[in-house]
Amino acid sequence: MATNAPETPTRPPAVILAGGRSMRMGRPKAGLVLDGRPILDHIVERLAPQVGSIALNLNADPGITLPPGLAVLADTVPGYFGPLAGILTAMRHAAEVAPHAPHVLTVATDTPFFPDDLVGRLSSIPDLEGTIAVAWSDGEMHPLFALWPVAIADDLEAWIRTDAKLRVRAFIARHPSAAVDFPMIATKAGPLDPFFNINTPDELQQAESWLQRLKDPKP
Ligand SMILES: Nc1nc2c(ncn2[C@@H]2O[C@H](COP(=O)(O)OP(=O)(O)OP(=O)(O)O)[C@@H](O)[C@H]2O)c(=O)[nH]1
Ligand SMILES: [Mg+2]
């Protein structure tokens, strides 16, 4: 989605990762509805103030009308090679739409409570250039929430074409990286991990419950 903001290091291009098969959910996660609205609306709303442009990485029809103006990108290396294929697609897209942007941001379509200061904090690490800045919370890495140097796209493509396991963490370990820790969100029902992600119908119900708690006044 085009916004009026220029592409600067603090307003990077962004890609929403939704290219998986959604096997556990049983239907495309990009087509989920949360709080009566498409989950993509929640994601785009949170992302738009933080980034210069937004595209959506998808490999199948999500079965809904997409938010207007969202560029849709199929994997540049087709064959469901996993999230790294989505990250590569994001890097290739960024190189096209924002040739001077050193990084591209990725977020996942199934993680609706991600921080509204995600980009600000990821891009504030020292020596950002050439570094993968990755979100953490509660002692866990969230490797799909990261700023990726576009310059490592060819290395990633070679890795996808040759590595058997295709683990995102293993790819990150090949490059300089920095961890940025995000706090839990306080709710009346206890702490909510901002990177709570929805994989199953049960987790979709949990997300609905968290949303109602977030609407309550802060404890
Ligand atoms: N581009 C792309 N993205 C993928 C692929 N596999 C998973 N992803 C994305 O990676 C993220 C994490 O994957 P999961 O949460 O396991 O989603 P999923 O693979 O669709 O769901 P399951 O089939 O239930 O594992 C999600 O945003 C997926 O859309 C793939 O082959 N290509
Ligand atoms: Mg998966």
Image: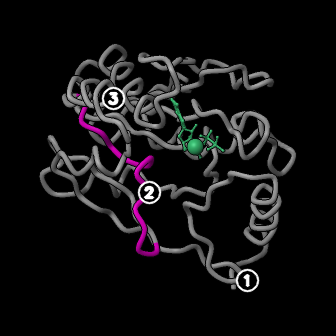
Q: Which amino acid does label 3 sit on?
A: Ile
> How far is mark 2 from mark 1, CA to CA?
25 Å
Q: Residue furthest right?
A: 36
Tell me if residue 103 is in the magenta stretch. Answer: no
Do the residues under discs 1 and 3 have CB atoms within 8 angstroms? no
Asked which quadrant contains residue 190, the reply is bottom right
Identify the residue shown where x is 67% and y is 20%: 60
- Whether 40 is drawn above or below 60: the answer is below
Q: How far apart are marks 2 and 3 (CA)?
A: 20 Å
Query: Is 190 left, or right, of 92 in this rendering?
Result: right
The answer to which image quadrant residue 135 occupies is bottom left
What residue is at 83 percent from the left and 51 percent from the top? 35
- Of badges 1 and 3, the one in the foreground is 3
**Residue at 56% over, 26% down:** 56
Number of other residues with Cα within 10 Å of mark 1, as a class: few under 14, some 14 to 19, many 20 or more:
few
Point out the tag, 1 or 3, that comes first from the N-terminus.
3
Residue ID for mark 3: 160
Residue 198 rendering spot, x and y as whole percentages: 68, 53
Residue 64, x across and y down, in percent: 80, 25
Specify whether residue 147 is painted magenta. yes
Q: In this rendering, would 129 be left or right of 83?
A: left
Q: Give the range drawn in magenta.
A: 138-150
Name which residue type carries label 1: Lys
Residue at label 1?
Answer: 188
Residue designated by label 2: 142
Give the x, y percent position of residue 187: 68, 78
